[in-house]
Image (cartoon, helix red, strand yellow):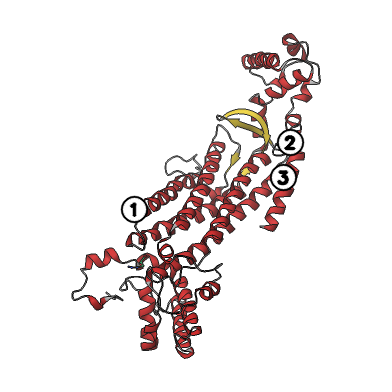
Amino acid sequence: MAQLWGGRFTKETDQLVYNFNASISFDQKFYRQDIRGSIAHVTMLAKQGILTDSERDQIIAGLQGILKDVEDGTLEISSKYEDIHSFVEANLIDRIGDVGKKLHTGRSRNDQVALDMKLYTRDEILEIDKLVKTLLETLLKIMEENLDTYMPGFTHLQKAQPITLAHHMGAYFEMFKRDRSRLNDIYKRMNTCPLGSGALAGTTYPLDREYTAELMEFDGPTFNSMDSVSDRDYVIELLSAMSTIMMHLSRFSEEIIIWNTNEYRFVEIDDAYSTGSSIMPQKKNPDIAELVRGKTGRVYGALMSMLTTMKGIPLAYNKDMQEDKELTFDAIDTTKGCLALFTGMIATMKFNNAVMESSAKNGFTNATDAADYLVNHGVPFRDAHGIVGQLVLYCIEKNISLDEMSLEEYQKISDVFQDDIYEAISMETCVKKRVTIGAPGQDAMKKVIAASKEYLSKN
Ligand code: ARG
Protein backbone atom coordinates (compact mmCIF):
# COMPACT_ATOMS: atom_id res chain seq x y z
CA MET A 1 0.00 0.00 0.00
CA ALA A 2 1.42 3.35 -0.98
CA GLN A 3 -0.59 6.41 -0.12
CA LEU A 4 0.02 10.08 -0.67
CA TRP A 5 -1.93 11.16 2.35
CA GLY A 6 -0.56 9.08 5.26
CA GLY A 7 0.53 12.08 7.39
CA ARG A 8 -2.50 12.55 9.61
CA PHE A 9 -3.13 8.83 10.04
CA THR A 10 -1.82 6.67 12.87
CA LYS A 11 -3.19 3.33 11.68
CA GLU A 12 -2.78 1.45 8.43
CA THR A 13 -5.82 1.31 6.15
CA ASP A 14 -7.75 -1.94 6.40
CA GLN A 15 -6.86 -4.07 3.37
CA LEU A 16 -10.48 -4.44 2.25
CA VAL A 17 -11.00 -0.69 2.54
CA TYR A 18 -7.86 -0.14 0.53
CA ASN A 19 -9.02 -2.45 -2.22
CA PHE A 20 -12.50 -0.94 -2.23
CA ASN A 21 -11.15 2.59 -2.46
CA ALA A 22 -8.35 2.06 -4.97
CA SER A 23 -8.84 2.91 -8.63
CA ILE A 24 -5.47 1.93 -10.13
CA SER A 25 -6.90 -1.22 -11.72
CA PHE A 26 -8.89 0.94 -14.12
CA ASP A 27 -7.56 4.53 -14.02
CA GLN A 28 -4.17 3.27 -15.20
CA LYS A 29 -5.83 3.58 -18.58
CA PHE A 30 -5.01 7.27 -18.55
CA TYR A 31 -1.36 7.27 -17.60
CA ARG A 32 -0.58 9.25 -20.77
CA GLN A 33 -3.10 11.95 -19.96
CA ASP A 34 -1.89 12.11 -16.36
CA ILE A 35 1.71 12.64 -17.44
CA ARG A 36 0.72 15.17 -20.09
CA GLY A 37 -1.20 17.17 -17.47
CA SER A 38 1.73 17.06 -15.07
CA ILE A 39 4.16 18.29 -17.73
CA ALA A 40 1.87 21.21 -18.52
CA HIS A 41 1.48 21.95 -14.80
CA VAL A 42 5.22 22.11 -14.04
CA THR A 43 5.89 24.07 -17.21
CA MET A 44 3.45 26.66 -15.92
CA LEU A 45 4.83 26.53 -12.35
CA ALA A 46 8.28 27.40 -13.69
CA LYS A 47 6.96 30.17 -15.90
CA GLN A 48 5.33 31.68 -12.81
CA GLY A 49 8.53 31.42 -10.79
CA ILE A 50 7.03 28.81 -8.43
CA LEU A 51 9.61 26.24 -9.58
CA THR A 52 13.06 26.95 -10.99
CA ASP A 53 13.82 26.08 -14.59
CA SER A 54 16.17 23.37 -13.41
CA GLU A 55 13.48 21.82 -11.18
CA ARG A 56 11.07 21.94 -14.10
CA ASP A 57 13.56 20.24 -16.40
CA GLN A 58 14.32 17.47 -13.91
CA ILE A 59 10.63 16.80 -13.30
CA ILE A 60 9.78 16.78 -17.00
CA ALA A 61 12.68 14.46 -17.80
CA GLY A 62 11.53 12.15 -15.02
CA LEU A 63 7.92 12.16 -16.27
CA GLN A 64 9.05 11.50 -19.83
CA GLY A 65 11.14 8.61 -18.57
CA ILE A 66 8.11 7.12 -16.80
CA LEU A 67 6.02 7.51 -19.96
CA LYS A 68 8.65 5.82 -22.09
CA ASP A 69 9.14 2.97 -19.66
CA VAL A 70 5.42 2.32 -19.32
CA GLU A 71 5.00 2.41 -23.11
CA ASP A 72 7.80 -0.04 -23.77
CA GLY A 73 6.82 -2.34 -20.93
CA THR A 74 9.88 -1.82 -18.71
CA LEU A 75 7.74 -0.22 -16.02
CA GLU A 76 4.61 -2.04 -14.96
CA ILE A 77 1.77 -0.05 -13.44
CA SER A 78 1.63 -1.74 -10.06
CA SER A 79 -1.53 -2.24 -8.03
CA LYS A 80 0.37 -1.34 -4.89
CA TYR A 81 -0.51 2.28 -5.62
CA GLU A 82 -3.94 3.66 -4.92
CA ASP A 83 -4.42 5.34 -8.27
CA ILE A 84 -2.56 6.42 -11.38
CA HIS A 85 -1.74 9.82 -9.86
CA SER A 86 0.02 8.22 -6.87
CA PHE A 87 1.82 5.78 -9.15
CA VAL A 88 3.26 8.54 -11.32
CA GLU A 89 4.24 10.77 -8.40
CA ALA A 90 5.86 7.96 -6.40
CA ASN A 91 7.80 6.78 -9.44
CA LEU A 92 8.94 10.29 -10.14
CA ILE A 93 10.29 10.67 -6.60
CA ASP A 94 12.06 7.29 -6.92
CA ARG A 95 13.73 8.49 -10.08
CA ILE A 96 14.69 12.08 -9.38
CA GLY A 97 14.58 12.31 -5.59
CA ASP A 98 13.14 15.13 -3.48
CA VAL A 99 12.59 17.56 -6.34
CA GLY A 100 9.86 15.17 -7.53
CA LYS A 101 7.92 16.06 -4.39
CA LYS A 102 7.33 19.52 -5.86
CA LEU A 103 5.18 18.20 -8.71
CA HIS A 104 1.96 18.43 -6.75
CA THR A 105 2.45 22.11 -5.80
CA GLY A 106 -0.81 24.02 -6.36
CA ARG A 107 -2.71 20.96 -7.46
CA SER A 108 -5.15 18.46 -6.01
CA ARG A 109 -6.05 15.03 -7.26
CA ASN A 110 -9.52 16.48 -7.72
CA ASP A 111 -8.54 18.87 -10.48
CA GLN A 112 -5.97 16.34 -11.70
CA VAL A 113 -8.53 13.58 -12.22
CA ALA A 114 -11.01 16.04 -13.71
CA LEU A 115 -8.32 16.98 -16.22
CA ASP A 116 -7.29 13.39 -16.97
CA MET A 117 -10.87 12.36 -17.60
CA LYS A 118 -11.42 15.30 -19.93
CA LEU A 119 -8.22 14.66 -21.85
CA TYR A 120 -9.09 10.98 -22.16
CA THR A 121 -12.69 11.44 -23.31
CA ARG A 122 -11.69 14.28 -25.62
CA ASP A 123 -9.27 11.97 -27.47
CA GLU A 124 -11.84 9.21 -27.57
CA ILE A 125 -14.50 11.50 -29.06
CA LEU A 126 -12.16 11.98 -32.02
CA GLU A 127 -11.58 8.23 -32.30
CA ILE A 128 -15.31 7.47 -32.24
CA ASP A 129 -15.90 10.22 -34.78
CA LYS A 130 -13.34 8.67 -37.12
CA LEU A 131 -15.09 5.31 -36.92
CA VAL A 132 -18.48 6.87 -37.63
CA LYS A 133 -16.95 8.67 -40.60
CA THR A 134 -15.64 5.38 -42.02
CA LEU A 135 -19.12 3.94 -41.62
CA LEU A 136 -20.55 6.92 -43.52
CA GLU A 137 -18.04 6.43 -46.32
CA THR A 138 -19.03 2.78 -46.57
CA LEU A 139 -22.71 3.71 -46.69
CA LEU A 140 -22.11 6.33 -49.35
CA LYS A 141 -20.35 3.79 -51.53
CA ILE A 142 -23.32 1.40 -51.27
CA MET A 143 -25.63 4.31 -52.08
CA GLU A 144 -23.71 5.28 -55.21
CA GLU A 145 -23.77 1.71 -56.47
CA ASN A 146 -27.46 1.12 -55.84
CA LEU A 147 -29.47 4.02 -57.19
CA ASP A 148 -31.44 1.57 -59.33
CA THR A 149 -31.65 -1.33 -56.90
CA TYR A 150 -35.37 -1.48 -56.15
CA MET A 151 -36.70 -2.82 -52.90
CA PRO A 152 -39.81 -2.47 -50.78
CA GLY A 153 -39.92 0.31 -48.24
CA PHE A 154 -41.80 -0.73 -45.11
CA THR A 155 -44.11 0.75 -42.53
CA HIS A 156 -45.23 -1.51 -39.65
CA LEU A 157 -42.82 -4.02 -41.24
CA GLN A 158 -45.44 -4.34 -44.00
CA LYS A 159 -44.43 -3.58 -47.55
CA ALA A 160 -45.47 -0.01 -48.31
CA GLN A 161 -43.95 1.74 -51.34
CA PRO A 162 -41.01 1.01 -53.61
CA ILE A 163 -37.72 2.61 -52.72
CA THR A 164 -34.11 1.85 -53.63
CA LEU A 165 -31.30 0.38 -51.61
CA ALA A 166 -29.52 3.72 -52.01
CA HIS A 167 -32.45 5.47 -50.36
CA HIS A 168 -32.62 2.97 -47.51
CA MET A 169 -28.88 3.31 -46.83
CA GLY A 170 -29.30 7.07 -47.11
CA ALA A 171 -31.60 7.02 -44.08
CA TYR A 172 -28.79 5.55 -41.99
CA PHE A 173 -26.35 8.02 -43.52
CA GLU A 174 -28.43 10.86 -42.07
CA MET A 175 -28.64 9.21 -38.64
CA PHE A 176 -24.91 8.66 -38.34
CA LYS A 177 -24.24 12.14 -39.69
CA ARG A 178 -26.28 13.55 -36.80
CA ASP A 179 -24.26 11.36 -34.44
CA ARG A 180 -21.09 13.03 -35.64
CA SER A 181 -22.56 16.44 -35.14
CA ARG A 182 -23.52 15.49 -31.56
CA LEU A 183 -19.92 14.36 -30.89
CA ASN A 184 -18.66 17.60 -32.31
CA ASP A 185 -20.99 19.64 -30.08
CA ILE A 186 -19.85 17.77 -26.97
CA TYR A 187 -16.21 18.34 -27.86
CA LYS A 188 -16.76 22.08 -28.24
CA ARG A 189 -18.73 22.39 -25.01
CA MET A 190 -16.37 20.35 -22.85
CA ASN A 191 -13.15 21.87 -24.14
CA THR A 192 -12.27 24.00 -21.11
CA CYS A 193 -9.46 23.15 -18.71
CA PRO A 194 -10.17 22.35 -15.02
CA LEU A 195 -6.50 22.27 -13.98
CA GLY A 196 -5.72 24.91 -11.37
CA SER A 197 -9.06 24.53 -9.61
CA GLY A 198 -7.29 22.76 -6.76
CA ALA A 199 -9.36 20.63 -4.42
CA LEU A 200 -12.38 22.90 -4.82
CA ALA A 201 -11.47 26.55 -4.17
CA GLY A 202 -8.52 27.29 -6.43
CA THR A 203 -5.10 27.79 -4.87
CA THR A 204 -3.07 30.57 -3.27
CA TYR A 205 -0.26 30.17 -5.81
CA PRO A 206 -0.21 32.60 -8.72
CA LEU A 207 -1.04 29.90 -11.30
CA ASP A 208 -1.49 30.89 -14.93
CA ARG A 209 -4.52 28.83 -15.85
CA GLU A 210 -4.82 30.35 -19.33
CA TYR A 211 -1.35 29.10 -20.04
CA THR A 212 -1.93 25.46 -18.98
CA ALA A 213 -5.20 25.48 -20.90
CA GLU A 214 -3.34 26.64 -23.98
CA LEU A 215 -0.54 24.08 -23.53
CA MET A 216 -3.14 21.31 -23.64
CA GLU A 217 -5.15 22.79 -26.50
CA PHE A 218 -8.19 23.76 -24.50
CA ASP A 219 -10.20 26.82 -25.49
CA GLY A 220 -9.48 28.32 -22.07
CA PRO A 221 -9.79 27.60 -18.34
CA THR A 222 -13.06 26.69 -16.62
CA PHE A 223 -14.71 29.55 -14.72
CA ASN A 224 -15.72 28.02 -11.41
CA SER A 225 -13.39 25.84 -9.41
CA MET A 226 -16.16 23.99 -7.54
CA ASP A 227 -17.94 23.15 -10.78
CA SER A 228 -14.65 22.22 -12.45
CA VAL A 229 -13.81 19.44 -10.03
CA SER A 230 -17.31 18.02 -9.92
CA ASP A 231 -18.52 18.48 -13.50
CA ARG A 232 -19.16 15.21 -15.30
CA ASP A 233 -21.82 16.60 -17.66
CA TYR A 234 -19.59 15.88 -20.62
CA VAL A 235 -19.35 12.24 -19.57
CA ILE A 236 -23.14 12.02 -19.47
CA GLU A 237 -23.38 13.76 -22.83
CA LEU A 238 -20.85 11.40 -24.35
CA LEU A 239 -22.64 8.36 -22.92
CA SER A 240 -25.86 9.74 -24.34
CA ALA A 241 -24.33 10.32 -27.78
CA MET A 242 -22.86 6.81 -27.71
CA SER A 243 -26.24 5.42 -26.68
CA THR A 244 -27.77 7.08 -29.73
CA ILE A 245 -25.04 5.67 -31.97
CA MET A 246 -25.70 2.23 -30.51
CA MET A 247 -29.46 2.68 -30.96
CA HIS A 248 -28.85 3.43 -34.65
CA LEU A 249 -26.49 0.47 -35.00
CA SER A 250 -29.03 -1.72 -33.23
CA ARG A 251 -31.90 -0.74 -35.54
CA PHE A 252 -29.67 -1.36 -38.53
CA SER A 253 -28.59 -4.71 -37.08
CA GLU A 254 -32.21 -5.70 -36.59
CA GLU A 255 -32.91 -5.00 -40.26
CA ILE A 256 -29.89 -6.96 -41.37
CA ILE A 257 -30.93 -9.91 -39.20
CA ILE A 258 -34.37 -9.84 -40.83
CA TRP A 259 -32.97 -9.36 -44.34
CA ASN A 260 -30.56 -12.23 -43.80
CA THR A 261 -33.33 -14.76 -42.96
CA ASN A 262 -34.30 -17.50 -45.41
CA GLU A 263 -37.70 -15.86 -45.67
CA TYR A 264 -36.28 -12.52 -46.88
CA ARG A 265 -32.93 -13.38 -48.44
CA PHE A 266 -32.32 -9.67 -49.23
CA VAL A 267 -28.71 -9.97 -48.09
CA GLU A 268 -26.07 -12.51 -47.43
CA ILE A 269 -23.61 -11.77 -44.66
CA ASP A 270 -20.07 -12.69 -45.63
CA ASP A 271 -18.66 -15.93 -44.17
CA ALA A 272 -15.99 -13.88 -42.40
CA TYR A 273 -18.73 -12.07 -40.45
CA SER A 274 -21.00 -15.05 -39.70
CA THR A 275 -20.81 -17.98 -37.35
CA GLY A 276 -22.08 -21.54 -37.46
CA SER A 277 -23.94 -23.84 -35.09
CA SER A 278 -22.30 -26.63 -33.14
CA ILE A 279 -25.20 -28.96 -33.86
CA MET A 280 -27.05 -27.74 -36.98
CA PRO A 281 -24.73 -28.03 -39.97
CA GLN A 282 -26.87 -25.84 -42.24
CA LYS A 283 -26.70 -22.76 -40.02
CA LYS A 284 -24.99 -19.48 -40.76
CA ASN A 285 -25.91 -17.04 -38.06
CA PRO A 286 -25.76 -13.24 -38.00
CA ASP A 287 -24.03 -13.19 -34.61
CA ILE A 288 -22.20 -9.92 -35.15
CA ALA A 289 -25.42 -8.04 -35.84
CA GLU A 290 -27.04 -9.72 -32.85
CA LEU A 291 -24.14 -8.84 -30.57
CA VAL A 292 -24.20 -5.22 -31.68
CA ARG A 293 -27.93 -5.16 -30.93
CA GLY A 294 -27.27 -6.83 -27.57
CA LYS A 295 -24.38 -4.60 -26.52
CA THR A 296 -26.59 -1.55 -26.96
CA GLY A 297 -28.02 -2.44 -23.55
CA ARG A 298 -24.61 -2.11 -21.93
CA VAL A 299 -24.10 1.40 -23.24
CA TYR A 300 -27.62 2.49 -22.18
CA GLY A 301 -26.84 0.95 -18.78
CA ALA A 302 -23.70 3.07 -18.46
CA LEU A 303 -25.72 6.21 -19.20
CA MET A 304 -28.32 5.34 -16.56
CA SER A 305 -25.59 4.48 -14.01
CA MET A 306 -23.83 7.77 -14.52
CA LEU A 307 -26.99 9.83 -14.31
CA THR A 308 -27.92 8.01 -11.12
CA THR A 309 -24.43 8.34 -9.61
CA MET A 310 -24.43 12.10 -10.18
CA LYS A 311 -27.95 12.89 -9.05
CA GLY A 312 -27.30 13.19 -5.30
CA ILE A 313 -23.78 14.59 -5.22
CA PRO A 314 -23.44 17.85 -3.29
CA LEU A 315 -20.73 20.28 -4.37
CA ALA A 316 -17.86 19.80 -4.84
CA TYR A 317 -15.82 16.59 -5.34
CA ASN A 318 -17.11 13.37 -3.77
CA LYS A 319 -15.66 9.93 -4.17
CA ASP A 320 -18.84 8.70 -5.89
CA MET A 321 -17.41 10.33 -9.00
CA GLN A 322 -14.67 7.74 -9.25
CA GLU A 323 -17.47 5.50 -10.56
CA ASP A 324 -17.44 7.46 -13.83
CA LYS A 325 -14.42 5.63 -15.17
CA GLU A 326 -15.12 1.93 -15.54
CA LEU A 327 -18.50 2.46 -17.12
CA THR A 328 -17.28 5.17 -19.46
CA PHE A 329 -14.25 3.15 -20.54
CA ASP A 330 -16.46 0.13 -21.14
CA ALA A 331 -19.04 2.12 -23.08
CA ILE A 332 -16.33 3.73 -25.24
CA ASP A 333 -14.63 0.40 -25.98
CA THR A 334 -17.99 -1.23 -26.71
CA THR A 335 -19.13 1.54 -29.05
CA LYS A 336 -15.82 1.61 -30.90
CA GLY A 337 -15.75 -2.17 -31.26
CA CYS A 338 -19.31 -2.26 -32.54
CA LEU A 339 -18.72 0.55 -35.05
CA ALA A 340 -15.64 -1.14 -36.48
CA LEU A 341 -17.21 -4.58 -36.77
CA PHE A 342 -20.51 -3.32 -38.10
CA THR A 343 -18.74 -1.34 -40.82
CA GLY A 344 -16.74 -4.41 -41.83
CA MET A 345 -19.90 -6.48 -41.92
CA ILE A 346 -21.84 -4.17 -44.23
CA ALA A 347 -18.82 -3.50 -46.44
CA THR A 348 -18.59 -7.23 -47.20
CA MET A 349 -22.30 -8.04 -47.22
CA LYS A 350 -23.86 -9.17 -50.51
CA PHE A 351 -27.17 -7.61 -51.55
CA ASN A 352 -29.52 -9.86 -53.52
CA ASN A 353 -30.85 -7.19 -55.84
CA ALA A 354 -33.21 -9.47 -57.80
CA VAL A 355 -34.82 -10.80 -54.62
CA MET A 356 -35.34 -7.29 -53.28
CA GLU A 357 -36.90 -6.11 -56.53
CA SER A 358 -39.28 -9.04 -56.83
CA SER A 359 -40.24 -8.58 -53.18
CA ALA A 360 -41.21 -4.98 -53.95
CA LYS A 361 -43.30 -6.07 -56.94
CA ASN A 362 -45.06 -8.88 -55.13
CA GLY A 363 -46.02 -6.79 -52.17
CA PHE A 364 -48.22 -4.27 -54.07
CA THR A 365 -45.81 -1.48 -53.21
CA ASN A 366 -46.97 0.15 -56.45
CA ALA A 367 -50.62 0.28 -55.35
CA THR A 368 -50.39 3.98 -54.44
CA ASP A 369 -49.00 4.68 -57.91
CA ALA A 370 -51.88 2.74 -59.51
CA ALA A 371 -54.29 4.98 -57.58
CA ASP A 372 -52.32 8.07 -58.69
CA TYR A 373 -52.69 6.85 -62.29
CA LEU A 374 -56.47 6.93 -61.91
CA VAL A 375 -56.34 10.36 -60.25
CA ASN A 376 -54.30 11.66 -63.20
CA HIS A 377 -57.14 10.43 -65.41
CA GLY A 378 -59.75 12.41 -63.46
CA VAL A 379 -60.90 9.85 -60.89
CA PRO A 380 -61.26 11.37 -57.38
CA PHE A 381 -58.59 9.95 -55.03
CA ARG A 382 -61.05 8.28 -52.63
CA ASP A 383 -62.68 6.39 -55.55
CA ALA A 384 -59.27 5.52 -56.98
CA HIS A 385 -58.26 4.10 -53.59
CA GLY A 386 -61.35 1.84 -53.64
CA ILE A 387 -60.72 0.65 -57.21
CA VAL A 388 -57.10 -0.23 -56.51
CA GLY A 389 -58.27 -2.02 -53.35
CA GLN A 390 -60.38 -4.26 -55.59
CA LEU A 391 -57.41 -4.87 -57.90
CA VAL A 392 -55.29 -5.93 -54.93
CA LEU A 393 -57.97 -8.30 -53.68
CA TYR A 394 -58.26 -9.81 -57.15
CA CYS A 395 -54.48 -10.30 -57.35
CA ILE A 396 -54.32 -11.88 -53.90
CA GLU A 397 -57.00 -14.39 -54.94
CA LYS A 398 -55.14 -15.22 -58.15
CA ASN A 399 -51.74 -15.04 -56.46
CA ILE A 400 -50.30 -12.57 -58.97
CA SER A 401 -48.82 -9.08 -58.82
CA LEU A 402 -50.42 -5.94 -60.29
CA ASP A 403 -48.16 -6.00 -63.34
CA GLU A 404 -49.22 -9.56 -64.10
CA MET A 405 -52.88 -8.64 -64.63
CA SER A 406 -54.07 -8.41 -68.23
CA LEU A 407 -55.54 -5.17 -69.54
CA GLU A 408 -58.96 -6.88 -69.83
CA GLU A 409 -58.78 -7.81 -66.18
CA TYR A 410 -57.94 -4.18 -65.34
CA GLN A 411 -60.77 -2.86 -67.46
CA LYS A 412 -63.28 -5.21 -65.86
CA ILE A 413 -62.67 -3.32 -62.63
CA SER A 414 -62.32 0.15 -64.19
CA ASP A 415 -62.43 1.18 -67.86
CA VAL A 416 -60.17 4.16 -67.11
CA PHE A 417 -57.16 1.82 -67.33
CA GLN A 418 -55.28 1.81 -70.66
CA ASP A 419 -52.15 -0.07 -71.64
CA ASP A 420 -49.91 2.72 -70.25
CA ILE A 421 -50.84 1.43 -66.76
CA TYR A 422 -47.96 -1.05 -66.94
CA GLU A 423 -45.42 1.66 -67.37
CA ALA A 424 -47.08 3.76 -64.65
CA ILE A 425 -46.75 1.01 -62.04
CA SER A 426 -43.32 -0.29 -62.95
CA MET A 427 -40.76 -0.05 -60.15
CA GLU A 428 -38.67 2.25 -62.35
CA THR A 429 -41.51 4.73 -62.80
CA CYS A 430 -42.68 4.56 -59.18
CA VAL A 431 -39.22 5.49 -57.96
CA LYS A 432 -38.22 7.89 -60.74
CA LYS A 433 -41.32 10.02 -60.23
CA ARG A 434 -40.49 10.65 -56.59
CA VAL A 435 -38.45 13.72 -57.36
CA THR A 436 -38.67 15.92 -54.29
CA ILE A 437 -35.47 16.27 -52.31
CA GLY A 438 -35.21 13.47 -49.75
CA ALA A 439 -37.27 11.07 -51.91
CA PRO A 440 -35.86 7.91 -53.57
CA GLY A 441 -36.07 9.19 -57.18
CA GLN A 442 -32.66 8.97 -58.86
CA ASP A 443 -32.45 12.68 -59.64
CA ALA A 444 -33.19 13.60 -56.03
CA MET A 445 -30.82 10.93 -54.73
CA LYS A 446 -28.00 12.14 -56.95
CA LYS A 447 -28.27 15.60 -55.42
CA VAL A 448 -28.18 14.10 -51.92
CA ILE A 449 -25.18 11.95 -52.80
CA ALA A 450 -23.31 14.97 -54.15
CA ALA A 451 -24.09 16.94 -50.97
CA SER A 452 -23.06 13.98 -48.81
CA LYS A 453 -19.75 13.69 -50.65
CA GLU A 454 -19.09 17.34 -50.09
CA TYR A 455 -19.97 16.96 -46.40
CA LEU A 456 -17.49 14.10 -46.04
CA SER A 457 -14.76 16.03 -47.81
CA LYS A 458 -15.20 18.96 -45.41
CA ASN A 459 -15.87 17.17 -42.13
N1 ARG B 1 -9.41 8.13 -7.95
C1 ARG B 1 -10.08 9.37 -7.71
C2 ARG B 1 -11.22 9.51 -8.73
O1 ARG B 1 -11.19 8.82 -9.66
C3 ARG B 1 -9.12 10.51 -7.84
C4 ARG B 1 -9.46 11.71 -7.05
C5 ARG B 1 -9.24 11.46 -5.62
N2 ARG B 1 -9.60 12.58 -4.85
C6 ARG B 1 -9.91 12.46 -3.53
N3 ARG B 1 -10.25 13.53 -2.92
N4 ARG B 1 -9.95 11.31 -2.94
O2 ARG B 1 -12.09 10.30 -8.57
In this rendering, the answer to whether 205 lies above or below 419 is: below
Instruction: Compare residues 312 and 383 and report the one nearer the observer.
Output: 312
Q: Residue furthest left?
A: 11
Tell me which corner region of the image, top left, top right, bottom left or bottom right, holds residue 164: top right
In the rendered image, which residue does mark 3 sit on? Answer: 448
Within-10-Å neighbours for mark 2: few <14, some 14–19, many 20+: few
Q: Residue at x 77, y 24 (%)?
A: 424
Using the numbered discs, state the Cα–Cα distance from disc 3 to disc 2 in whole angstroms: 11 Å
Dot label at residue 312: 1
Of the two numbered discs 3 and 2 on the same chain, state the one appearing first in sequence: 2
Instruction: Compare residues 330 and 178 and report the one nearer the observer.
Output: 178
In the rendered image, which residue does mark 2 sit on? Answer: 436
Task: Name the secondary structure under disc 2.
Answer: loop
Of the two numbered discs 1 and 2 on the same chain, state the one appearing first in sequence: 1
Of the two numbered discs 1 and 3 on the same chain, state the one appearing first in sequence: 1
Where on the image, by quarter, is ligand 1? bottom left
Task: Name the secondary structure under disc 3.
Answer: helix
Task: Name the secondary structure under disc 1.
Answer: loop
Within-10-Å neighbours for mark 1: few <14, some 14–19, many 20+: few
Q: In the rendered image, which quarter contains the N terminus?
A: bottom left
Q: Position of residue 450 (x, y in %)?
A: 74, 49
Residue type at the position of mark 3: Val
Using the numbered discs, state the Cα–Cα distance from disc 1 to disc 2 in whole angstroms: 50 Å
Tell me which corner region of the image, top left, top right, bottom left or bottom right, holds residue 115: bottom left
